[in-house]
Amino acid sequence: MQNYARKKIIAVDRVTFRYDIKDHLTKDKIKEKPEIGCFVYGCYIEGCKWNYSTHMLDDSDPKKLFVEMPMIHMVPVEDRVVPKTGLYYAPLYKVLSRTGTLSTTGHSTNFVTFLELPTDKEEDYWIRAGVAVFLALKF
């Protein structure tokens, strides 16, 4: 009989993700999976850019509509207390249209989740700029 390590069972409604932006890493530098969570790369942001010096959102460069996001480490955390300031909850969509059909869960079939992105500006600033993140661009 095999001896399995005991895993802590956590109710799904007590788990949320922390989004660590790994702007110092590229997918080529990753040689193994993280101990916990997962790495996400290949997303694009519209309406702003990522500032690699300040490690937060910044205004877009002229004539650049979409910019590739740095790698994101999604870390599951039990009973996480979400910071009240310093974050923009960027909607993450599958495709650029930002529309989808309403599913039985009450959510759009195009919407994935909200990403918590660090910022030194109020959330309204990024909402007015139309900032969103996408899994795929249509060229």
Image (tube, helix red, strand yellow):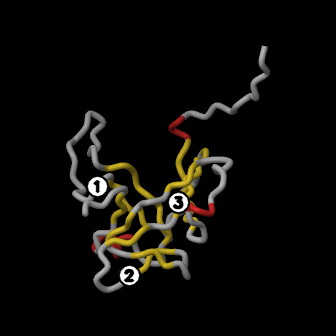
Q: Nearer the viewer, residue 39 or 123?
A: 39
Q: Nearer the viewer, residue 18 or 5?
A: 5
Q: Residue at (56%, 33%) from the top-left corner?
A: 11
**Under tag 3, what secondary structure?**
strand
User: In the picture shown, does residue 97 fall above or below 86?
Assistant: above
Residue neighbourhood size for the residue with mark 2, other residues' Cα within 10 Å, grouped as few (<14), some (14–19), many (≥20): few
Q: Are marks 2 and 3 in contact (CB under 8 Å)?
A: no
Residue neighbourhood size for the residue with mark 3, other residues' Cα within 10 Å, grouped as few (<14), some (14–19), many (≥20): many
Q: Where does label 2 land, which residue? A: 59
Residue furthest to the front: 28
Q: Where does label 1 land, which residue? A: 95
**Under tag 2, what secondary structure?**
loop
Q: Residue at (30%, 36%) from the top-left corner?
A: 105
Q: Position of residue 124 (x, y in %)?
A: 34, 72
Q: Where does label 3 land, which residue? A: 72
User: In the picture shown, does residue 34 fall above or below 48?
Assistant: above
Q: Earlier in the sequence, mark 1 or mark 2?
A: 2
Determine the image quadrant of residue 31. bottom right
Q: Nearer the viewer, residue 104 or 36?
A: 36
Residue neighbourhood size for the residue with mark 1, other residues' Cα within 10 Å, grouped as few (<14), some (14–19), many (≥20): some
Q: Residue at (47%, 61%) from the top-left corner?
A: 116
